[in-house]
Amino acid sequence: MTEQEKIAVADADDAITADIAVIGLGYIGLPTAAVLASYGWNVCGVDVSPHVVETVNAGGVHIEERDLDGLVHKAIEDKTLSASLDVPSARYYMIAVPTPLGDNKAPNIAYVESAARAIAPKLLPGACIIVESTSPVGTTERVAEIIAEARPDLRMPAFGDIESGDVAIAYCPERVLPGRIVNELVHNDRVIGGVTPACAESAAKLYRSFVQGDCLITNARVAETVKLVENSFRDVNIAFANELSIIADKIGVDVWDVIKLSNRHPRVNILQPGPGVGGHCIAVDPWFLVAGAPEEARLVRTAREVNDHKAVHTENRIRALLDAAPGGKVALLGLAFKPDIDDFRESPALEIAENLAKDMGDRILVVEPFTEALPPQLEGTDATLTQLSPALREAEIVVILVDHTAFKHLGADDLGGKIVFDTRGMLKK
């Protein structure tokens, strides 16, 4: 290293204000930032919401996730975690921003692109950028393009090269289950894909510092595809169960008995149906795979359509029950996309409640223990958010949309005389 290069490295070190900058403090970003801070890294979490930044800096959390509040509080106390509206100079950047669906189910990576543009002015030689947001194939390379456009003074890695360039760029998708995020961030295997092998290795150094599972190295395109394939596989299997439940309705058999007995076959493992599929991952990621090969991804597309239609089928069954009980009220138990969390993203239960409330809101009683107010989708309707006991007293019809633990004690004494529609098979279990 020449004397000039040594001076440049020393200047870069002096300019660094955080070991790691986590861009996006949502359901993945905040737990990731807190876990990294608990392992001794100096972490700055960046978010566009002043409320989120203020809450985190006060040692609080704005999302419901097991063990997260204590972890954040201690990290703030220990001064290993801070939050900011501005991107700092850091050794590592982790992008954990939303990647929603746009028009016609097309992937929207605008937030990832915006994060890359925000990082670019602060980027110093030797830094590593890691995209964690679920993304269509090619997004990591798009991040490299954005950085190259904004920082022509830095040499960017190119896919297929050996060296990483002046900065490293990689992709490492999260593989966690809401309600177990803190635990699984540490214990699950991670797939780390670099734009170049050197980029992958640079990112792997960070993950090996806290991940107790295996860190599996590949290229960025493979890693991006792996994430989409994992959730598409689950979506296809759920679609079979959901379609089976619709068939069972049509032919007049109990789907729960059919699944229970079918699963006694040594090579059959049918999943449990529900009112649809929600959450940001399974309900969204398969469309990213379809977008990459629209003509070829026929099964993946059909599975998505089956699962989206299951919410329509469930809504229609509830409407039929209401039509058969003129003036009667329905208690909708649960709005979240899965049990025991406060996450309503892409929730079929919320979609069903929203559609019903639009034209018969005064007959809709909502019971959701993980919120203190109706979600925005239900604001302005005549639907009522209430507790379980008064809902059961007032409603003639009870629909179990989410099998929250708070509902699992329900039995014949609680539901006697009611019309009950159990979309989760909770009472069977």
Image (cartoon, grey):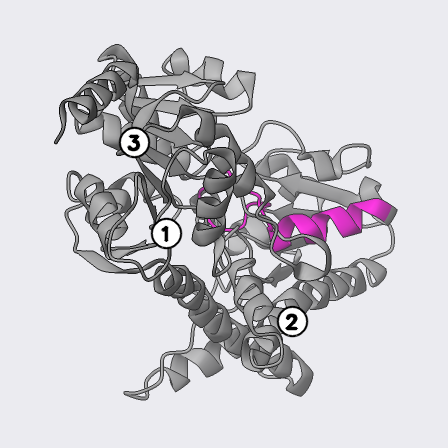
Mark 3 secondary-structure assignment: loop
Does the segment drawn in magenta span residue 175? no
362, above or below 321, in the image: above
29, above or below 133, in the image: above
**Which segment is the magenta one?**
334-358
Q: CA distance from mark 1 to mark 3?
A: 24 Å
Q: Look at discs 2 and 3 and give the one toward the viewer.
A: 3
- One can see residue 329 in this view: no
* Residue bearing the label numbered 3: 125
Q: How many marks?
A: 3
User: Residues at badges 1 and 2 in contact (C-beta under 8 Å)?
Assistant: no
Q: Nearer the viewer, residue 297 or 272?
A: 297
Q: Earlier in the sequence, mark 1 or mark 2?
A: 1
The amino acid type found where label 3 is placed reads Pro
Q: Nearer the viewer, residue 162 or 139?
A: 162
Q: Residue 239, image x and y in percent?
A: 54, 73
